[in-house]
Amino acid sequence: MMRALVVTVAVAPAVLLGCRRVETPPSANVVLASAAKLPSEPSDAAWNAAPEYVAKLIPQDLVDPRLMTASTAELRVRALSDGSRAAFRLEWRDETPDDMSATARFADACAVQFPAAVEPTVPSPQMGEAGRPVAITYWSASWQAFVDGRGNSLQDIYPNAAIDHYPFEAASLKSGSAEQQAMAARYAPAHALGNDLAGPRKLPVQDLIAEGPGTLSPVASTDSDGRGSRTQDGWAVVIRRQLPAGFAEQLHTQIAFAVWEGSHEEVGARKMRTAWITLTNQEKP
Amino acid sequence: MARVYNWQIRRQMSYWYPENRPQKQFAAVFDINKCIACQTCTLACKTTWTSGKGQEYMLWNNVESKPYGFYPLMWDSKLLGMLGPQAWNKETFAGRTIFEAAPAGERVLGWRPAEFDYAYPNVGEDDCAGTVEHGVSLHGPHMLWFYYLARICNHCTYPACLASCPRASIYKRPEDGIVLLDQGRCRGYRECTKACPYKKVFFNPLTGTSEKCIACYPKIEQGIQPQCFVNCIGKIRLAGWISTPEKAREDNPIDYLVHVKKVALPLFPQFGLEPNVYYIPPVHAPAKFLQQMFGPGVQAAIDAYRSAAQDEKLAGLLGLFGSTERVVPRFAQEKDWVTAREEDGKEILRVPLREPIYIREAFDKKYQVVRTNCP
Ligand code: SF4
Ligand code: SF4
């Protein structure tokens, strides 16, 4: 009996260590450790090879609309690279999982940002500037929920909702026919324009480009991927993407992060963010 | 913020963008006295534009009973409460608009309704102000009253929705002043649903974008009035074009009603948006309540409306409401007729000032039957 108790006590710190993985000391900047294969899961043991950087977050309070009260304090970042692509794991505390976007509900989200090209001077960390774009990959908890199987119907938001009729689902229209789909598209103009901000979604992330606040636009086709999941006290999100052009030669650039806390109605410009942080390759031993 | 001129409050005010009026401004007059709350307008809009998935709760057109009807819940009283008491100095607004009252970090003073605030579109229907006590009698204005307020997007000259969008996804068309929300550009930030004081932008949770009234612009482009106008059973609506007061034309129906006769008034002009749907206020409701909603011109508007029986031009123009599908840019009244005209003067249709009365013999000799005449 006594023995069993001792074993339990001894195991507990090991479990905690497994979560926080403090074996590498915190890093002074974001360092890309090399990896033969980039992990897709936040829980992959491969992340242990990368040093952890703790990014302090500040509210976006430079351009209106601003975030006037701070929320998420910090972000823990680990980074891996296979030479051409990089994988980032972003972890932060968030006790209120918000994975749905509805009229007055906002989803948790995060993003990584680079100067679009590695140059001697960097564009403004605040979404870049005209002629000097920044490249962004954005992950949303709501998109993750769609990827993980949540449907995109009214009942997925309001389970007891009853709907009499949608005209494009009339019995006289053959389901799936060109005529039927054209009619459905007329009542969903954002879908018709390919602006897929809700479900169904293949990816929980989107690649974007910006040249200053208010100019954010998706690139023609997202090349990044990612996956986020809940941890005990928040989110862990993997974002895998191309390193910016010129990184292979310079071996350093800048990176910035942002986190949106859905329960705090954070969306768009209302977010917690970092300034530029140096991103380097880990020295080869 | 820029300084712009808002003629409805007769002063300069702050706005996010500089003054940039369209070549023409879409506008409408709604005669509240004729609305019967049949909601045909609401359904005409719903079936045309918002029958899609994620649009279920949206009513780009709604009709609510004032004082207790709201869609969404408390849309106007909540903002009035946030602004606190505000004063007019005669016809000049001496208080703060929602742009001037914007707190730090915001472009506009606004609030975002909760989801359930949209769940009762017909709350307060036909509920009158006060309780029916012994001794209540009918006189004007009524001791107990309610009226119907039909609402669409006001296609404001200074839209709060447009000002609030950090991505500039909302734009005002230079050719007709219609305010549209770009469905390809919107990223669902919902700044606009918070900023529009009239709560006429709605979030579609199944596309992730916000949507709003488009003034049936494909119809307007063809010179035809929007769906909620041509389907209006009460014939309370007239669509057209409004000029700024110094350019007002006597032969432009909207200018005539708003600027010349001053019988139609904007909704909550003190918010500062220069909304372009104008209301002929209800004659039976107390002026104090109406002044809060339509500004200081209420009593003069009611007096002008009451005098329409002696004013052939005004009476004639009121007869053009609901008489044609076409937008009526010009009109003329000559003797017993009022004509709706195109901009170039071409006649669209003519309506008699007074409908002729036909009296039939009560007994039809030919068919040997007795007939009833209706007045
Ligand atoms: S159709 Fe006309 S009369 Fe009927 S509710 Fe609408 S505005 Fe009022
Ligand atoms: S009524 Fe609201 S949605 Fe319409 S233009 Fe004005 S601010 Fe925008």
Image (spheres, rainbow, N blue to C red):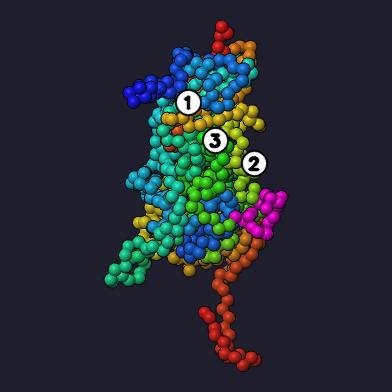
In this view, which residue lies farthest toward the left? B134
Q: Is residue B6 visible?
A: no
User: Which chain's residue wears label 3?
Assistant: A
Q: Is residue B97 visible?
A: yes
Residue B106 part of the magenta-drawn span = no
Query: What residue is drawn where x is 66% and y is 32%?
Result: A220
Residue type at mark 3? Gln
Have a look at marks 2 and 3 and say if they share a chain: yes
User: Which chain's residue wears label 1?
Assistant: A
Give me the C-alpha separation between circle 2 and circle 3. 22 Å
Residue B333, position in %: x, y?
58, 64
Residue A110, position in %: x, y?
51, 29
Residue type at mark 2? Leu
Which residue in the protein does label 1 denote? Answer: A91
Query: What residue is drawn where x is 39% and y is 58%?
Result: B67
Ranked by sequence position, the earlier of labels 2 and 3 is: 3
Residue A180 part of the magenta-drawn span = yes
Neighbours of disc 1 within 10 Å: few (<14), some (14-19), many (20+): many
> Relative to B137, does residue A120 appear above or below in the rendering?
above
Quarter of the rendering containing residue A223: top right
Residue A69, position in %: x, y?
39, 30
Ranked by sequence position, the earlier of labels 2 and 1 is: 1
Which residue in the protein does label 3 denote? Answer: A144
Which residue in the protein does label 2 denote? Answer: A193
Have a look at marks 1 and 3 and say if they share a chain: yes
> Looking at the rendered structure, which numbered label has been put on residue A280?
none
In this view, which residue lies farthest toward the right? A178
